[in-house]
Image (cartoon, rainbow, N blue to C red):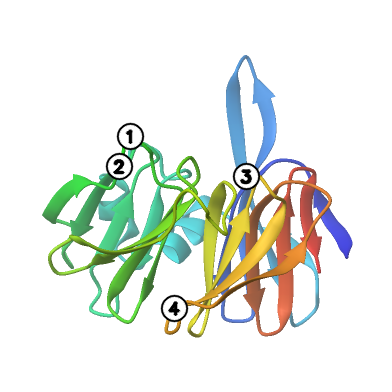
Amino acid sequence: MKKIFSGEIFEVLPLTNGIIFSYCRNTIEDNIIVAYKMISFDNGKFSDVAKNIYLITKFGNNYKAVVEHCDNYITVKSIVLPNGKVFLMSADGTAQLLDNDASAVWTGSLIYRSCTPGDIVLHNNALWVCYPDCDILLRYNLSTMREELRIGGNKSPFNKPRDIFLEGDNAMISNQGSKTLTQINLKDYTVFDYETFEEPLYQYINIAGNRFAVLESGLYLI
């Protein structure tokens, strides 16, 4: 494992042949200065990118209108659905489904037993949500937004699950508490610990066989 970027990283997003990420460039009088970098797998080089490139990657082509619905475009989680709609989830658990014109067609809350959600992914038209403070993974029906299935609880395979990354039918869960990457198959629900790190694991991503981990000290190539 090789560290390729030091510092506080907020989120890594996948590109077709690379990644783009937001990070803390500086802090001035408690104000965080956010910047953005991209890594191209063609040449392996870092390059600074503009804010709009990051936003279009995260929110889609209608990003200007979508951002108007975000209390914080860095911390909000987003899914651009196959039909062009966008699902947003804020850090406080507030959620919205936006139509193609960015008008809200549904608003609600994804708070579960007073626990706020950590991350969301879409798998087979179902919404999966992880809850760091409950150590659970919930599946919601995207049409009704009703809870359908819960994984975890008192004897949970998770420990502060913070992030979800999909590899086919496998959800790769980044556990901040146990510093472990846990794999769960979303068809048969088999679970096993895939990898353990020396620091809290914040995010995992795998693009074209290039595996990255966001740890407390920075971004690593696994």
Q: Do the residues labelled 1 and 2 touch (CB within 8 Å)?
A: yes
Q: Are marks 3 and 4 in contact (CB under 8 Å)?
A: no
The image shows residue 131, relative to residue 85, as above or below, that is above
Indicate the quadrant where residue 206 lies: bottom right
Mark in the foreground, 3 or 4: 4
C-alpha separation, residue under disc 4 versus residue under disc 1: 25 Å
Q: Which residue is drawn at 88% across and 65% down?
A: 1
Q: Name the residue under label 3.
A: 35
C-alpha separation, residue under disc 1 versus residue under disc 3: 33 Å
User: Residue type at mark 2?
Assistant: Ile
Q: Mark 1 points at which residue?
A: 114
Mark in the foreground, 1 or 3: 1
Q: Which residue is drawn at 31% across and 54% down?
A: 88
Q: Name the residue under label 2.
A: 111
- Mark toward the start of the polypeptide (2 vs 4): 2
| Element type at mark 3 | strand
Q: Name the residue under label 4.
A: 186
The image shows residue 213, relative to residue 26, as above or below, that is below
The image shows residue 66, relative to residue 34, as above or below, that is below
- Mark toward the start of the polypeptide (4 vs 1): 1
Q: Position of residue 200 (x, y in %)?
A: 72, 46
Indicate the quadrant where residue 195 lies: bottom right
Q: Are marks 3 and 2 in contact (CB under 8 Å)?
A: no
| Element type at mark 2 | loop
